[in-house]
Amino acid sequence: MNQDAVIFKGVRDGIRIYIDSNFSKAQIMDALQRKIESGRRFFQGSQTNLTFIGKKLTPDEQQVIIDLISREINVGSITFEMTEMENSDIRPIDPFDGIEEGMTRFVRGTIRSGQLVSYEGNVVIIGDVNPGGEIVAEGNIIVMGTLRGMAHAGATGNNGAVVVAFSLLPTQLRIGSVIARPPEGEVVKASYPEIAYVKDGNLVIEPYLPSKGK
Amino acid sequence: MGEVIVITSGKGGVGKTTTTANIGTALALAGKRVVLVDADIGLRNLDVVMGLENRIVYDLVDVVEKVCRLKQALIRDKRFESLYLLPAAQTKDKNAVSPQQMQELCEQLKEEFDFVLIDCPAGIEQGFKNAIAGADKAAVVTVPEVSAVRDADRIIGLLSANDIDEPKLIINRLRIDMVKRGDMMDINDTLDILGIDLLGVVPDDERVVISTNRGEPAVTDDNSLAGQAYRNIAGRLMGENIPIMDMETDEGFLAKIKRFFNANRKRA
Amino acid sequence: MFDLFKFFGKGESKSKDIAKERLKLVLIHDRANISPRYLDMIKDDVIKVISSYMEIDEKGMDIRLSRIPQKDDTYSTALVANIPIKKVKNLGPNKG
C-alpha cells in the first residue's frame, strides 16, 4: 500500500509527484525516500523539474521534502513548482477544455514511424500518420489524410475530445482514458471520412457525413 | 528463477527478430513461461512480427522511467497465455535506457518467467550494450554469408569481453540447394570459422515470410521446415538432446526426397 | 543435370570455398586487431632495422598477413614480407 502514497509521473517538462492525502506524513516521507533511492540514476545528470500535487503540505513538511530531495539527488539545480500547496482547494490537473475553441497546432507532412507529435491543444495533421507514428493531443486530433498510427486525443483526461481522419485505420486509438484497438482479423477499409468519440465509456467510430456512410 | 538469453548478431537483417519470436513461441508452446523483450528502442519490430502492435500502451522505457509498473507494460500473446511481450519505445532513442537499468529489469523478469528472450538491435553501440547487460546466455544468429559471419565473429568477441562466454550459434536461412552446389558455406564451414557450439540450423523457408506477414510466428505452422527447426532449438534450450535435423545437414534433405520419390515410383 | 553442372564447375574453386578463405583472412585481422595502420607501423620498423644492413626499395616493399598451407591440409597464419633489395651495404669488418 505504501508505494501508492506518492506517484511519480514523467511529463514533458519534468516529473509530477502526486501525494495521496489519505496517507500519514510518515508514510509519505517513507514512500518518497524509497522512490527517490530506486530511481536515483534516473534523476542524475539532468536538471529535473519537480512538481508536487495532491495533499496539502505545511511549510515544515515542504522543507523536509526539500531537504530529502536535495540530499538524495545530486543534480546541479532543482526547480520546485510547489503548486496547489498553499490553496486549500486541491484540484487534479485540468483536462484541456479547448476542444470547442482553443489552441491548435497544424502539422504539414507525413508523420512516420518513430515520430511523435504532442501538443497541449488540438492537432491538425495535413498529411498521413504512418504505422508507428504517434499523435498525442490534449484536445482533438484531425488528420487530413490516412491515420494508420496511434492517436491519443484528450490526453489529459478530456473524454469529450474526438479523432477525425479522411481514412481512419489506426493501430490503436485513445480518447481521454479510453483505449481501443481495431477488431482482430478483419480489415475494414472505409472509403469515407470517419469520427471517433467516446459514448457511454466506449469508443465509437462512425461516418460524420451521414450521406457518405453505407 | 528463469534465465535471460540475448539473441544477437551484429549485422542487421539476418533474422534476429524472427528468431526471437519463433523460439519464444516454441518455448511457450512447450508450456514454459516466456517474455520477449524488444531492446531495439526507436526501431521496434518484435510487436509486428508477433502481431501485437495494436495492443501497446506502455513500453520498456516507460517501465524504466517508472511511468508505469512492469506488469502494465507486458502484453499477453493472442495465442499462448504463458507468452508475453515487453515492447520497445518507438519515439525515443537508445540512450533512454542504461545498461544498469536493463540489468535491474532482467532481474525482475527472471522472477516471473522461465525464459527471458532479448531481441538485440543490430550494431555494437549503446543498444547492444543495453541488450546484453542483463543476459546470462547469448545466441548469435548468422546467415551463411561472409559479411554476416564476420560480424558474428566480432559479436562473439564482444560477448566474451562482457563475460558472456560460450554463446551458441544459430545458422539462419541455409539454402540446401546452394550448399549442394558448393555456392553457400555449409554448417561445418561456418562452425569451423567461428568455433562455437551450434544451437540450431534454420533452413530458408518462404513460409517464414508468409507467417510474418500475418503476424503469426512460423513455429505454429506444422508444415514449415523452419518452424520445425525453431521447435528443435527451443527443445535444446530446455535441455533436451535433439540432434540437428536430417534436412539441416548438407546431404540429408535432398537425398531423402529423392529416396521418397524413388520409393513411390517403385510402388506405382 | 547435376553431374553436368559438376562437370562444368570443375577446375575453378567453388564460391563457398573462396568465401571461406576470404573470411578466414579477414578474421585473422579482426581478431588480432591488426589494422592496416598497425601493419604500416610494423613496416616502418622493419625498414628501420633492415636499412642498417642493406639499401631497400621502400616503395616496392609489401608486408601483409597471409595463410600458408601446411602438409596436413591445414593453414597457418604468417606475416609475409617482400622486400626488394637495391644494394647490400658494405659493413667493413665482414669484407675481409
Image (cartoon, rainbow, N blue to C red):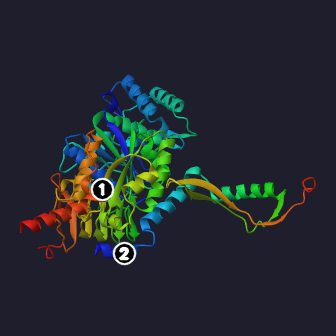
Quadrant of the snapshot with the N terminus of chain C: bottom left
Q: CA distance from mark 2 to mark 1?
A: 24 Å
Name the mark on residue B249.
1
Residue kind at label 2, given as amino acid type: Phe
Query: In the picture provided, is B225 more to the left or to the right than B199?
Result: left
Amino acid on which disc 1 is placed: Thr
Q: Residues within 10 Å of mark 2 (few under 14, many from 20)?
A: few
Single out the residue that lies furthest toward the left. B268
Q: Locate residue A84 relative to residue B81 in the image: left or right.
A: right
Residue A94 appears in the figure: no
> Which quadrant of the figure contains the C terminus of chain C?
bottom right
Q: Is residue A174 left or right of residue B268?
A: right
- Where is residue B183 shown, x and y percent of the image? 38, 67
Crowd band around label 1 with a 10 angstrom C-alpha radius: few (<14), some (14–19), many (20+): some
Say which residue label 2 marks. Answer: C7
Most distant residue in the front direction: C96
Residue at horizontal 44%, vertical 57%? B149
Relative image position of residue A66 (x, y in whole percent): 50, 31
Q: Quadrant of residue B223?
A: bottom left
Residue A121 is tagged as: none
Residue beneath the point at 47% across and 50% down: B155
Q: Is residue B4 visible?
A: yes
Q: Nearer the viewer, residue C60 or B13?
A: C60
- Displayed quadrant of residue B206: bottom left
